[in-house]
């Protein structure tokens, strides 16, 4: 197989894109990534763009055609992909596979979501309804906000099976808010959250579903944002004028999808996610012991715990404890979600999977903000999910050799 390298990463600040239109967002993503390496969009052979809510919230389809409006991108092999919250990760794999097939030597993977109005405000009921489309229709009745309700049940299940407490899981949010204050791209950069605040039912913090343990601070953000990665073969790097030592190798990747319905499967030990992660490690020829940087899909704190287990940093049931014991901090065993994660960096659904890999690119090339930079980064793992732990995209990255 050809080696695939990440040559550049660019993202917006996550939070509010205000009056930016979808065509403006996609053009900014392409041109921003190209500027990072002084390349022209005409030097890119293929592209893929991931988004989940573009039709339901933005009334816009055929995103590939909007990408082609960027000067230099017309007439190229471009596609739009949707895999719920794993759309961004799927876009990266789509480009990598095109390069492996010899359909090009360079490509760009874009992810975006515009979830807020031009005034920056959120229609919470509409967002809840739209995101609910990514659950099984038989599991929606009786749930006003479908995904918080589903993950509140998963949180309750995790606590009951492993003896974890609300405080154990709250540590994940507290740590991530602490990281986000150093990340200039994070939505919640200016917000401080203490453990006491994360546990106390007061002000913005409340139980999302009556009788279930999920609280506001256990939840990721409703976010606007875009992100883009330029990928290339070794030949493509030469064409772009990028030195290999400035790149990161996409050393391994995997994708697997479980049935959409939760009934009849073990979401605490998701088989598809484990299979995709093992495939990525196997392709890379690495193991969890080689990894000291990771970005995982913590749409809710319980997924921060489960994700830590999926990437192999903790045994089943040990993920929350890994965070509580301080092992997820930069300089500790593995810098997990040093970006602030979905909980504090933000969760622009289609951009999330791209941004996870992009942050790891910055970490492995020493470009993360100083307080967040992992010392001597060796390799990185990412775990991006869609739906109720249904679609899983996993990658393993290492410095280019």
Image (cartoon, grey):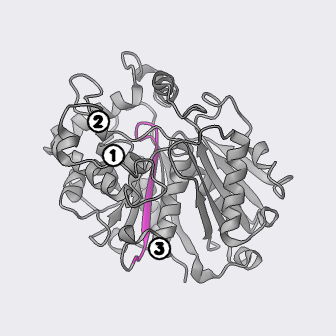
Q: Nearer the viewer, residue 70 or 394?
A: 70
The residue to which callout 1 is attached is 303
Distance of label 2 from label 3 (alpha carbons): 33 Å
Q: Callout 3: few (<14), some (14-19), or many (20+) C-alpha neighbours within 10 Å?
A: many
Distance of label 3 from label 1 (alpha carbons): 24 Å
Residue positioned 71% across, 64% down in the render? 34
For the record, the magenta segment spans 377-391
Residue positioned 32% across, 68% down in the render? 330
| Residue 287 in view in this figure | no
What label does residue 364 carry, if any?
Answer: 3
| Residue 72 in view in this figure | yes
Residue positioned 36% across, 77% down in the render? 375
Q: Callout 2: few (<14), some (14-19), or many (20+) C-alpha neighbours within 10 Å?
A: many
Q: Among all residues in the image, which is located at the extreme left?
A: 163
Contact check, label 2 and label 1, Cβ < 8 Å: yes
Question: Viewer-nearest of labels 2 and 3?
Answer: 3
Residue 91, image x and y in percent?
Answer: 62, 51
Q: Secondary structure at mark 1?
A: helix
Q: Nearer the viewer, residue 363 or 187?
A: 187
Badge 2 or badge 1: first in the primary sequence: 2
Q: Is residue 7 above or below residue 17?
A: below
Residue 29, image x and y in percent?
Answer: 66, 54
The residue to which callout 2 is attached is 154
Q: Callout 1: few (<14), some (14-19), or many (20+) C-alpha neighbours within 10 Å?
A: many
Q: Secondary structure at mark 2?
A: helix
């Amino acid at each position: 197989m050809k080696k695939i390298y990440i040559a550049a990463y660019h993202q917006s600040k996550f939070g509010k894109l205000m009056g930016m239109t979808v065509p403006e967002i996609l053009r900014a993503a392409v041109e921003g990534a190209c500027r990072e390496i002084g390349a022209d969009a005409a030097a890119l052979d293929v592209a893929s763009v991931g988004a989940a809510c573009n039709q339901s919230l933005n009334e816009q389809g055929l995103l590939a055609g909007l990408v082609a409006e960027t000067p230099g991108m017309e007439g190229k092999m471009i596609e739009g992909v949707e895999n719920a919250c794993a759309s961004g990760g799927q876009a990266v794999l789509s480009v990598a596979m095109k390069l492996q097939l010899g359909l090009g030597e360079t490509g760009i993977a874009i992810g975006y979501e515009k979830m807020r109005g031009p005034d920056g405000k959120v229609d919470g009921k509409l967002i809840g309804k739209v995101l609910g489309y990514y659950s099984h229709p038989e599991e929606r009745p009786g749930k006003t906000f479908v995904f918080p309700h589903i993950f509140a049940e998963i949180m309750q299940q995790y606590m009951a099976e492993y003896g974890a407490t609300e405080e154990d899981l709250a540590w994940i949010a507290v740590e991530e808010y602490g990281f986000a204050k150093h990340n200039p791209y994070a939505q919640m950069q200016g917000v401080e959250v203490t453990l006491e605040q994360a546990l106390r039912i007061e002000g913005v913090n409340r139980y999302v579903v009556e009788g279930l343990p999920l609280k506001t601070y256990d939840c990721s953000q409703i976010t606007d944002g875009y992100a883009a990665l330029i990928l290339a073969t070794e030949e493509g790097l030469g064409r772009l004028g990028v030195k290999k030592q400035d790149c990161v190798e996409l050393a391994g990747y995997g994708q697997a999808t479980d049935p959409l319905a939760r009934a009849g499967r073990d979401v605490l030990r998701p088989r598809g996610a484990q299979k995709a992660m093992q495939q990525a490690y196997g392709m890379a020829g690495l193991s969890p012991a080689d990894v000291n940087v990771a970005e995982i899909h913590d749409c809710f704190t319980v997924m921060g715990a489960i994700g830590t287990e999926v990437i192999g940093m903790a045994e089943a049931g040990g993920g929350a404890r890994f965070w509580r014991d301080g092992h997820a901090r930069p300089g500790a065993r593995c810098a997990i979600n040093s970006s602030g994660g979905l909980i504090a960096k933000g969760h622009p659904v289609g951009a999330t999977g791209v941004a996870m890999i992009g942050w790891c690119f910055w970490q492995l090339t020493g470009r993360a903000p100083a307080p967040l930079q992992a010392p001597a980064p060796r390799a990185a793992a990412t775990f991006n999910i869609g739906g109720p732990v249904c679609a899983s995209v996993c990658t393993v990255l290492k410095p280019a050799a």
